[in-house]
Amino acid sequence: MLRGRFGALRLLFALPLFFVAAAWAHEFTLEALVTAFFKVEGREAHLVVRVPLYLFKAVRFPVRGVEVDVEHSGDAMQRALAALQAAVVVTENGRRLQPSTASGRLTLPSDRSFDVYGRAAAHVAAPVEPDTRIVVDQGYVDAHLVYPIESPDARFALATSAGQEIGTKLAIRFLGPHGEDRAVLVKSGTGPVELNPGVWTAARGFVGLGIAHIWTGLDHLLFLLCLVAPLRGVRPLLAIITGFTVAHSFTLIGSAFGLAPQGAWFPPFVEMMIALSIVYMAVENVIGVSVTRRALLAIGFGLVHGFGFSQGLQEQLQFAGSHLVTALFAFNFGIEIGQLAALAVMLPVLAVVLRYVLPGRVGPIILSLLIGHVAWHWMVDRWDDLNKVRWPSIGAGELASVSLWSIGLIAAAIMVRTLLSKLRLEPVVTSRARH
């Protein structure tokens, strides 16, 4: 969903890098990629890491013309390894580990040994060929740090506070003692991140992530405000919020298991539809609201918002470790907590505004027009983004996906209609008729 509009900042859960601020920070401004393996083997943990040479500006490898003086780079390599040892914070069950050995070498940019752990470790151990010629800032520093550990089944985490301003990303592969093989792509700048989190750690983290996802999603908050603004009474609110919750939970869970449509067109399509949902709700608030129709629309638009939630979740599932199902339901639970908290703030404020600031039926109309105006601009911008990608061809797979989601929509609609019947709600509440 939209992040960053009107000052709302998207929360980033990222893994910091391995660099000491004194060794590299302010001299490099481009985004960089660091690749690494973290392998737990017996009573040792091995960190094998490949760092672009241009990140080591302050280490100052000797040069000869436009090339690195590989033959006389021994002292500089030791300084680079010392920087890594000082910067890397590897913990075992919260206890910081210190490397027992550290080795490194310079590598040509054409080298492809970091595709698997075994080749990477063997490459770091091999000596540099005497005739190796590396243009300044064009190669890599490959390093191997070995950490003594107490138990291979412990919880391991990595962290550093350096390098936040350079936008560097770390692609790390965790290789556990029982065959675990997990890839994580993270951005520098945050605290410890567990490579093999426990179930409760994963659950807590994803509950918090779900709450943050709601509170930093201005478009979702405006949709909720439009959804409930003209309603009065607990039972209509209960029916409509229940329908919205069931629907977005349905698409969120389905998307996490790979059932959502694929392709570059789908994320901008979802974003455009989210903006459209706000515009439509704003217009309906002006012309009049039927509780039954609104409950059914809450289901339809809830499906769309669930796809939006899933896009934020996909980026973070890598931090769930082996507890993907737990993380999924914890994230959804966090969304519900955040949604209820938002409503707990919105509803009293809305009641005060509509009673003392914008009294009468004109209040919801003015409020809805203001929200609709903002959402209209979002919709136009997102439509432009959508037109920049290629639409998919409709095949058997796409038709099956549409059929599946249609069945889910019908099931959710039946559920909400049943709830409306049980609650015995009035069939119509209009913003024109109610003051």
Image: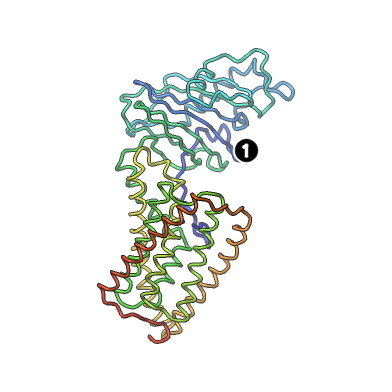
Q: Position of residue 137 (x, y in %)?
A: 66, 29
Say which element carries label 1: loop
Q: Position of residue 32 (x, y in %)?
A: 58, 37
**Residue at 54% across / 33% down in the picture?**
34
State which quarter of the image contains the C terminus: bottom left
Asked where in the image residue 149 lies, by quadrant, the reply is top left
Pointer 1 local density, CA inside 10 Å: few below 14, some 14–19, many at least 20: some
**380 in relation to 112, above or below:** below
In this view, which residue lies farthest toward the right?
Answer: 65
Residue closer to the observer: 77 or 354: 354
| Residue marked by disc 1 | 28
Please, what is the three-letter code of the amino acid marked with disc 1?
Phe
Q: Position of residue 282 (x, y in %)?
A: 48, 74
Residue closer to the observer: 243 or 323: 243
Residue closer to the observer: 127 or 242: 242
Left or right: residue 407 compared with residue 279: left
**218 in relation to 332, above or below:** below
Asked where in the image residue 422 lies, by quadrant, the reply is bottom left
**151 in relation to 199, above or below:** above
**345 in relation to 217, above or below:** below
Asked where in the image residue 347 lies, by quadrant, the reply is bottom left
Left or right: residue 377 compared with residue 154: right
